[in-house]
Image (spheres, grey):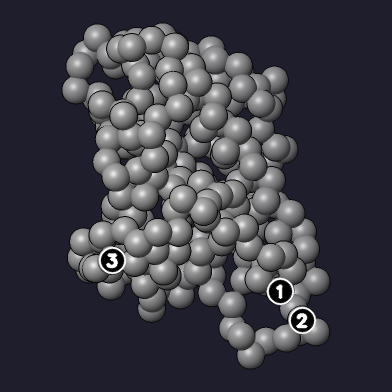
Amino acid sequence: MKYAWWVLLAACGFCGGAGHAVEQQVADVGPADDARGRWSFDIGPQPLSSAVRAFSDVTGQALLVDERLLVGRVSPGVRGEFTPEDALRRLLAGTGLRERYTSDKAFTLMPAVDTDIGIANMAPSAAPAETADTVVASYGAALQTAVEAALCRTSLTRPGEYRLALQVWVDGSGQLYRLRLLGSTGREERDKAVESILGGLHVDPPPPGLAQPLTLLLLPAGASRPAHC
């Protein structure tokens, strides 16, 4: 089966607001080599939030972003055959945002950098903002891995055959102490199994100050990479 994760921060007080200074500070990580081929995209103009969901569904690349950053922004869409990287840039054209790959399978979005602004004019807070962004992205990836591994333990909850949005709260010890399904997987039995498996799950402790809940969207099989179960 194939699937993708879309990971959002419902509120992002931890992230800060100086992501605009990142490009001059740290080089981006690129997508994996197997994601550099040309893919077929048919994503029409629509709100950016739904456009990036469609992109993740096609490519299997996970998104970690403060969802408030997407509010009110409209994507022109992308149609045709492109590399995922090129398609994502086209999807973001005119939105005032740019992508930054945090790993070969995940990316985040941030305000686009004004290329006329030099390093000398960067705000002093640029480095701390980048550090925060990197920490949040790393934690999102770790949380994704832990939840994925837990769901892979049974054939009923194994990812790939259903769509599920859920919110989770993680305490300072790393225990997932609260869970809320934002819909159904399509089977009541599976919904209950997901709640049973993830309720009380122990994951890496969140970084200090991370706003919660964290919202995760598990997408069904598509043109993304194979499941790891």
- Mark 2 falls on what kind of element? helix
Q: Quarter of the image holding residue 215?
A: top left
Q: How many marks?
A: 3
- Mark 3 falls on what kind of element? strand
Q: Which residue is mark 2?
A: 119
Q: Nearer the viewer, mark 2 or mark 3?
A: 3
Residue 76 placed where, x, y %?
Answer: 28, 72
x 57%, y 38%: residue: 141
x 66%, y 71%: residue: 23
Q: Amino acid at mark 2?
A: Ile
Q: Is residue 198 left or right of residue 4?
A: right
Q: Which residue is mark 3?
A: 81
Q: Amino acid at mark 3?
A: Glu
Residue 228 placed where, x, y %?
Answer: 45, 27
Q: Amino acid at mark 1?
A: Gln
Residue 30 placed where, x, y %?
Answer: 57, 59
How far apart marks 2 and 3 lie (CA) works out to 36 Å
Q: Which residue is mark 1?
A: 24
Which tag, 2 or 3, sits closer to the chain's start? 3
Q: Is residue 6 visible?
A: yes
